[in-house]
Image (cartoon, rainbow, N blue to C red):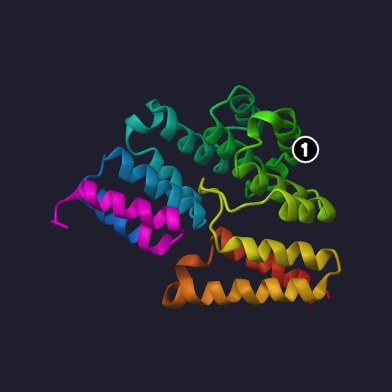
Amino acid sequence: MRPNDVESRIKVGESFLNLGRLPEALATLRLCTAADPLNMEANDFLGITQNLLGDRAGALASLSRTPEIASDQWTSADLLVAQFYNDVITREEFERHAETEYVQPILGQYLYALVDHPDPRQRDPEYVLNRIERDAVILSTLRWPGTVEIVARIRLEDWAGAIEAFEKRFKPQFLMLVTPLSYEFMRTLVYAHLGRENEARQAYRRGMLAWEDWTRDQTALWERSDAMRWRRAAEAALEKK
């Protein structure tokens, strides 16, 4: 790539993000915003990456940097999620947006945020499950509802429902709601709570093999990530066995 070819580098950063290669996405997109600070795409993808890495304040700053993000249908959803995670807007305000949203990828973002807010008091897994059930026919061909349902049931400690969703409805989703490294740790957590210790430990080993391959010498960047949070929850569940 040419040194100043920002648009090509944004595409590379987006590709890293969609693959779950978050440190590479972060480094690439920071180069893009350094070269073009108000570039809408670069700041949007940077904000999404920062959010997955657990840098909630950084994500909000990136997504607030250029007014075009707030005025675009797709990127404004990323901004709204960042505002919710940072308590700029209340859960009630956020749910009003979810209630009137029927663009499926955007709805997926909103529903996932309602089960993944860093403050458990701001989550609403019951609403999320009701919405998925209400729109079951419309959502039946999509992959992301399986992921959202699993996390909602985990939040409710409905371990049997979570494993049923894993086994019957889950497929890795294309919408980057969750870092791919998270899934085996989620499985570990659910299996452990169901007393299926062998399956839990097998899932954990698979998760750790992927973790070691993906993080390597970049573990500090993953410390606050969603994958690390699921890993810690999985390890805590295993320790109780």
Q: Residue 142: x percent and y percent?
A: 60, 40
- The front one of 201 and 65 is 201
Q: Residue 18: x percent and y percent?
A: 43, 53
Question: Is 5 in the magenta?
Answer: yes
Specify the principal SS of the magenta part: helix
Q: Is residue 44 left or right of residue 220?
A: left
Q: Secondary structure at mark 1?
A: helix
Question: Is 182 in the magenta?
Answer: no
Give the residue type that dot 1 points to: Glu
Residue furthest top in the image: 100
Residue visible at 63% across and 38% down in the picture? 111
Q: Is residue 98 left or right of residue 36?
A: right
- Residue 208 visible to an observer of this rendering: yes
On the image, numbered disc 1 is attached to which residue?
126
Q: Residue 207: x percent and y percent?
A: 61, 71
Residue visible at 80% across and 68% down in the picture? 192
The quarter of the picture where the C terminus appears is bottom right
As displayed, is residue 154 above or below residue 214?
above
Q: Is residue 236 left or right of residue 213?
A: right
- The front one of 83 and 75 is 75
- Residue 219 visible to an observer of this rendering: no
Image mark count: 1
The crowding category of the residue bearing disc 1, from other C-alpha atoms within 10 Å (few below 14, some 14 to 19, many at least 20), is some
Q: In which image quadrant can residue 133 be found?
A: top right
Q: Residue 48: x percent and y percent?
A: 45, 47
Residue visible at 54% across and 62% down in the picture? 224
Q: In which image quadrant can residue 201 be found?
A: bottom right
**Residue range corresponding to the magenta coloring:** 1-25
